[in-house]
Amino acid sequence: MLRLELSGISKQYPAVRANDRVSLRVKPGEIHAVLGENGAGKSTMMKIIYGAVQPDEGEMRWNGQPVKIKSPAEARALGISMVYQHFSLFDTLTAAENVWLGLGKGLALPEVARRIGEVAHTYGLDVDAQRPVHTLSVGERQRVEIVRALLTKPQLLILDEPTSVLTPQAVEKLFVTLRQLSADGCSILYISHKLDEIRALCHHCTVLRGGKVTGEVDPTQETNASLSRLMIGAEPPQLQHRPSQAGAPVLTVRQLSLARQDQFGADLHDIGFEVRAGEIVGVAGVSGNGQQELMAALSGEDPRAAAGSITLSGHDIAQAGPRARRALGLHFVPEERLGRGAVPMLSLAANTLLTRTETVSRAGWIASRRVQRLAEDLIARFNVRAGGAGAAAKSLSGGNLQKFIVGREIAAGPKLLIVSQPTWGVDVGAAAQIRGELLKLRDEGCALLVVSEELDELFEISDRLLVIAKGRVSPSVPVAQATIEQIGEWMSGLWHAEPAAAGTEA
């Protein structure tokens, strides 16, 4: 008997047919991958299974019985749990309180906190149950979501990009967990754009393209290239990463120390490095080690830095706000797409106004047609799948919204671009496009600082690497001289007090 069966499921939105007569079959204990490019309909299908979206037509069977799941609460009662790509957590509540809300009223909050600790320890997921969610990094929020799902002891666990912000070590621990759940009979629907993960973990794979099922394969018998062809109709383009011709320093950070702004943050200690014109400096590290605090200090969200500790092309910007920094050529892509990178309810056209003010006159008048054209140009240039410039940001898939936000900042022609998690939750084709655009911008003379928990990504596009751990930054190392093992050790704070490479600062 099948654990889950979908037959002829369709869902039409005003601008797109997200699912078109989709069928899916999942066996008990099976780890089943759902593969497709951004906007292919994967998330819509998962939301239908979880009761968050109602299909227009089609049938669903659960353990052989026809069901109509009208809400996530009904799904959880049946034994279905889901971890969303975009997290569903209340920022003002603690991790324990968020988990408690999803477990019903049968347990006291202290008992929930205790169980969180047990599950987190068992599965190697570092979660502090008492921390407010607004103090957590994206990676830490991901762990809370996963622990919350595991506490329900599901028969079917849906994971939407579960490893997008986890370290390699944490991914391996998660895979041990998922294999154990599978051995215990739990079925797992696994959405990921990481083809190596799908081939290593999953028993079966259903491929979606344009809302339709285009194939079913055994991923263990496929290559990354063959899976890419099934997903996007071609292999992703190969990056042209030529040696950099680094110029003068653009960003210089000297003796930057900042006390945390909340009790769960990380203090920054004597941080120093520089980024030159025409180079990409990558910053690796486990989430929660000071990345958020460093990004806030560099972007202008936190202007408490000591005078002279941050300079941009010779200008002291340590205590300048974001607008003043943009005027000097600094543009920034935050790790949180919805809510910080874009306003969910506003159109894509309106979202250009967050950082692209060339369409606003000195008197404050908005040139509506120029705003519209700018959004349309970004959609076309960066191959964003959306219902036009008037589409709300929240209507886009995560990958397409990421392409729009990154494109918005790249197209501004920055002197310094700071990007946090550039390809989080983005399919292989879109990730290759974004990385290619970053390299192109570097070759045009821009200085780039890229913070990512994807080590493979950093090795692919960076010229030099830094590691941040416990609020301190390692010496820089040229990518050609670095190894993943070395960077992995440094992510634990284990670097020697060696002098930085010539032309850089430690």
Image: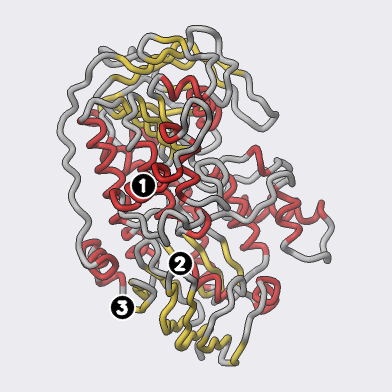
In front of the other: 364 or 431: 364
Q: Measured along the vertical axis of the image, is residue 156 above or below residue 400?
A: below
* Badge number at residue 214: 3
The answer to whether 353 appears left or right of 202 in the picture is right
Q: Which residue: 47% across, 33% down?
A: 360
Which SS class for mark 1? helix
Which corner quadrant of the image does residue 236 belong to?
bottom left
Residue 242 lies, in percent from the top left, at: 15, 34
Count neighbours of disc 3 (C-alpha within 10 A) and say few if under 14, some if 14 to 19, many if 20 or more: some
Q: Measured along the vertical axis of the image, is residue 152 above or below residue 246?
A: below
Disc 3 marks a residue whose amino acid type is Thr
Count neighbours of disc 1 (C-alpha within 10 A) and say few if under 14, some if 14 to 19, many if 20 or more: few
Kindly check if marks 3 and 2 are in contact, taking CB atoms under 8 A apart as contact: no
Q: Measured along the vertical axis of the image, is residue 300 above or below residue 220?
A: above
Q: Is residue 122 visible?
A: yes
The answer to whether 34 appears left or right of 57 in the picture is left
Residue 26 lies, in percent from the top left, at: 47, 81
Q: Which residue is mark 1?
A: 373
- The residues bearing labels 2 and 1 have C-alpha atoms spaced at a distance of 38 Å
Q: Which residue is mark 2?
A: 190
Q: Which residue: 67% across, 32% down?
A: 264
Q: Which residue: 44% across, 46% down?
A: 169
Disc 2 versus disc 1: nearer the observer = 1
In front of the other: 270 or 350: 350
Q: Which residue: 43% across, 74% down?
A: 17
- The residues bearing labels 3 and 1 have C-alpha atoms spaced at a distance of 35 Å
* Earlier sequence position, callout 2 versus callout 1: 2
Quadrant containing the C terminus in the rendered view: top left
Disc 2 marks a residue whose amino acid type is Tyr
Disc 1 marks a residue whose amino acid type is Arg
* Earlier sequence position, callout 3 versus callout 2: 2
In front of the other: 332 or 473: 332
